[in-house]
Structures are given as structure tokens and as C-alpha cells.
Image: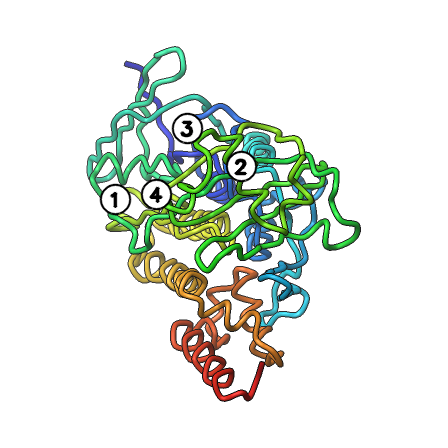
């Protein structure tokens, strides 16, 4: 069997893998990427957060994305009945990027991977990892391409950015269940001929359909809009079994989607994903580190997935390079603890979304503008800014504010 050598093997060419590969290559190390799928491939997670702009810029990928003409995103709109809560990224607590993009992920991910290839990194598509053996100072990975040809790759380090494929977690028994209740999503893309004029037609909108059921509406610059319903699995039992008929039924059941998408053309047959929340027992080991969805996926509600992918890809790449230089790396402190700070912060906000705490906060009257700025920074992805009280003490801050609002409503102090 043919054996090839590299300094770092990256599994997965999505955002986490592309960021990691670009940064490692930039430091002069030989890096190889293997990707199971053929690009472009469809994946959800289409609304980015401003924090990713830092990583795109540092990895030398920002200008290429700017030239692609994706829909610019300056904030997010939350809707409950007639109530509206707007967050403008230009009015946030943290000193960071004020905008980002909404992207068809197939096109976006292919662009990033292609730019990494242009920098001189080899990317092998339609190539699966079938076996990994760690040998102390290095590893041997067996890969097989679409034609069934096998070869081995010896590497000093592996970055597992395999996303939902979760290569190392599944291969070495590191998966563990998420603490979140199981949820299900049903989604498609519509040809959006009734898109509103101006900002309302261009920004992401999150609609509360019921307490634990919500809708994403994500417009793209090509005239297509992504629409998805997220709910407890039993919600969908009240709608038809067929994918198309089910989508038509739930679109018709909500006033915010019925008029705009009720008779709109679907660009593909609706798809369903369930049980997507997942966790892992560890984020690193001797000779490997997990990035992106190979670590943990929470929920799509605040579009945190790609942010965690790029943040982890960037952080992992820098630490890998330090280790290859012979420097001591505290992977627990500098990687796991760091990443869990952001993950746990978003976990609080996801929990607050489903238990109703954030609904109270978002739609309360007479909002405190400074608090809204702090929450806006969280929604922009700046969940490592410990100067922000709604990051540093996220759990207590969210719960306390929601309780105060409830008490004021009960006493008649606010509507």
C-alpha cells in the first residue's frame, strides 16, 4: 500500500478544516486535507455571525468571499405575532465586526476549500478515512478514494474537522449524547418572488411559531430564500408525511410564511434532520484535536455552528503549530477550556430560547439599551469577550433578567 507523509492531516474541507489548513500552511508546515464528499455539497448553517470575519481575514480568505457577492447581513430580526425585536450588529457592546453574510453553504464551502487549494494545500475529495492508528509521535491514516484505491498517510498531527461525519469520535468511541431534548427540522429553499423591499427582504428573520417551534427565513443574494421549521418531533405529526406536502402544510399554518411562500417554487424537495445535537467526551488527545461539529453541535437557532467551526479551526491550528515547533501546549486550558467558554455561553442562550427566558427579554417593553448591546454581541458571536456581563456571567445574567421582567409584568410595572 502506498504511504505518503505530511506534517498535519486535516479531515474535512468545511469551514473548520479550511481555516485550519490555511493557517497551518501559512506557518510553513505541510498540510493535507481529505474530504469524504464531492464539493459543492448541500449543508445547512447558512447564516454567519460577525465573529467569523476575523477568522476569514486571518486565514487570507476574506477578500475571496467578498468578491463572491453573498447577501450581506447586518443584524437579525425576531418576530412573535405582531411583536418585533431587532438586533443591529452596528450597535453592540464588543468592539468587533458589524456585519457578515448569509450564504448558500454549498457555494461558500467550495469557495473556501478552493482558495485553500490555490494556496498550495492538497485537498482530496471523495476520499474517506477508514482507519487511524496512533503511534506515539505520529499517526497512520488509511484512506480510500471513490474508485476504491487505498493509501496511507503518515502525519505528526491530525485535525478532525469532519463535521457530522465525526470520524475520530465515532472511530474511538468518544461520542456522548447532548443534554438538549431531541428536535427535528424540516427545510427547503424557495424562489422568493414575493420578497419584501429593503432591509426586511434581506435580513435573517426568526419567527416564533409556538413556544418551542420556530422558523428561520434566510434570504440569499441570488433571489432564493432558505426556510426551515424547527420543533419537537411530535409537532410534525399534525402535518402530512410526504416531504413536499408537509412543507406546504406547515408553511400555510403560519401567517408570516403563508403569504410569502405559500405558492412559491421549491428549489429542491424538502429535507428533514433530527437528533442533530451531539457532544463528545473530549476535544483532544495524543496526536489529534477535534474541531467544528466534530466537537459539539448545539442548535441552529442562533447560527453558532459555523462560528464554532472557524473559531475551533483557528485555535487548533495555532496550537498545532506551536506543538510542531517543540513548544509545550496546554491543550486543556488553551483549547478545551477556551472553546467550552463559548459553547457554554451559547448553550445558555439556546436553553433560554426554548424555556422562554429569551422570549421575555427580546419582546419586553422599555428595554435597557446597554443590556441589549451586550446581548447583541453574544448574537454576533463574541462569546469569548469576558468584559461582557452577558458572557462572563451568562447563565445568571439571562435568568435574572428574565425573572425581573416577569415580576414587573406581574406587578403591572411594564406591559
Helix, strand, or loop for circle 2? helix
Q: Which residue is mark 4?
A: 275
Residue 180 vs residue 394: left or right? Answer: left
Q: Residue at 46% of width from left, 23% of height from top? A: 125
Name the N-terminal-most of marks 1 and 3: 3
Q: How crowded is the residue under tag 1: few (<14 C-alpha within 10 Å), some, or many (20+)?
A: some
Q: Are marks 2 and 4 in contact (CB under 8 Å)?
A: no
Mark 3, other Cα within 10 Å: few <14 / some 14–19 / many ≥20: many
Q: Secondary structure under badge 4?
A: loop
Q: Please name which of the two marks, 4 or 3, marks the residue nearer to the observer.
A: 4
From what the image shows, is residue 143 above or below residue 189? Answer: above
Q: Which residue is mark 2?
A: 247
Q: How much space separates mark 4 and mark 3, taking CA atoms? A: 26 Å
Q: Which residue is mark 3?
A: 34
Please name the residue that numbered disc 1 is placed on.
Answer: 175
Q: CA distance from mark 4 to mark 1?
A: 13 Å
* Mark 4 nearby-residue class (10 Å; few <14, some 14–19, many ≥20): some
| Label 2 vs label 4, nearer the camera | 2
* Rendered location of residue 32, percent (x, y): 43, 31
Q: Earlier in the sequence, mark 1 or mark 2?
A: 1
- Inter-mark Cα distance, 2 to 3: 35 Å
Give the quarter of the figure containing the N terminus.
top left
Vertical comparison of 143 with 77: above or below: above
Image point (64%, 39%), residue name: 262
Q: Secondary structure at mark 3?
A: strand
Q: Where in the figure is residue 361, as x and y percent of width and height?
A: 52, 73
Q: Nearer the viewer, mark 2 or mark 3?
A: 2
Label 1: which secondary element:
strand
Amino acid at each position: 500500500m502506498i504511504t505518503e507523509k505530511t506534517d498535519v492531516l486535516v479531515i474535512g474541507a468545511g469551514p473548520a478544516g479550511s481555516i485550519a489548513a490555511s493557517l497551518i500552511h501559512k506557518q510553513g508546515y505541510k498540510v493535507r486535507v481529505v474530504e469524504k464528499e464531492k464539493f459543492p455539497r448541500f449543508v445547512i448553517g447558512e447564516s454567519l455571525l460577525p465573529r467569523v470575519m476575523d477568522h476569514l481575514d486571518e486565514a487570507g480568505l476574506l477578500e475571496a468571499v467578498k468578491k463572491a457577492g453573498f447577501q450581506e447581513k447586518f443584524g437579525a430580526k425576531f418576530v412573535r405575532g405582531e411583536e418585533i425585536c431587532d438586533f443591529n450588529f452596528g450597535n453592540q457592546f464588543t468592539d468587533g465586526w458589524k456585519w457578515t453574510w448569509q450564504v448558500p453553504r454549498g457555494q461558500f464551502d467550495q469557495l473556501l476549500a478552493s482558495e485553500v487549494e490555490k494556496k498550495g494545500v492538497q485537498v482530496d475529495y471523495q476520499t474517506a478515512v477508514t482507519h487511524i492508528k496512533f503511534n506515539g509521535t505520529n499517526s497512520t491514516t488509511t484512506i480510500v478514494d471513490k474508485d476504491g484505491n487505498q493509501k496511507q498517510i503518515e502525519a505528526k498531527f491530525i485535525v478532525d474537522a469532519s463535521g457530522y461525519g465525526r470520524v475520530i469520535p465515532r472511530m474511538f468511541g468518544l461520542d456522548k449524547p447532548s443534554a438538549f431534548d431531541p428536535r427535528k427540522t424540516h427545510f427547503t429553499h424557495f424562489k422568493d418572488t414575493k420578497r419584501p423591499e429593503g432591509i426586511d427582504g434581506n435580513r435573517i428573520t426568526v419567527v416564533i411559531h409556538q413556544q418551542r417551534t420556530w422558523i428561520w427565513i434566510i434570504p440569499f443574494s441570488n433571489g432564493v430564500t432558505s426556510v426551515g421549521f424547527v420543533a419537537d418531533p411530535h409537532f410534525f405529526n399534525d402535518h402530512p408525511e410526504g416531504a413536499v406536502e408537509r412543507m406546504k402544510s406547515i408553511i400555510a399554518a403560519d401567517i408570516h410564511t403563508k403569504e410569502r411562500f405559500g405558492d412559491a417554487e421549491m428549489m429542491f424537495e424538502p429535507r428533514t434532520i433530527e437528533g442533530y445535537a451531539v457532544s463528545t467526551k473530549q476535544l483532544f488527545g495524543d496526536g489529534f484535536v477535534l474541531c467544528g461539529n466534530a466537537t459539539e453541535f448545539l442548535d441552529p437557532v442562533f447560527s453558532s455552528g459555523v462560528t464554532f467551526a472557524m473559531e475551533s479551526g483557528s485555535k487548533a491550528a495555532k496550537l498545532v503549530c506551536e506543538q510542531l515547533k517543540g513548544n509545550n501546549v496546554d491543550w486543556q486550558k488553551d483549547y478545551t477550556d477556551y472553546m467550552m467558554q463559548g459553547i457554554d455561553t451559547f448553550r445558555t442562550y439556546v436553553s433560554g430560547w426554548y424555556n422562554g427566558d429569551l422570549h421575555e427579554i427580546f419582546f419586553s417593553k422599555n428595554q435597557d439599551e446597554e443590556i441589549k448591546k451586550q446581548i447583541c454581541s453574544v448574537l454576533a458571536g463574541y462569546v469569548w469577550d469576558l468584559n461582557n456581563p452577558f458572557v462572563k456571567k451568562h447563565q445568571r445574567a439571562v435568568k435574572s433578567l428574565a425573572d425581573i421582567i416577569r415580576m414587573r409584568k406581574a406587578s403591572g410595572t411594564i406591559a
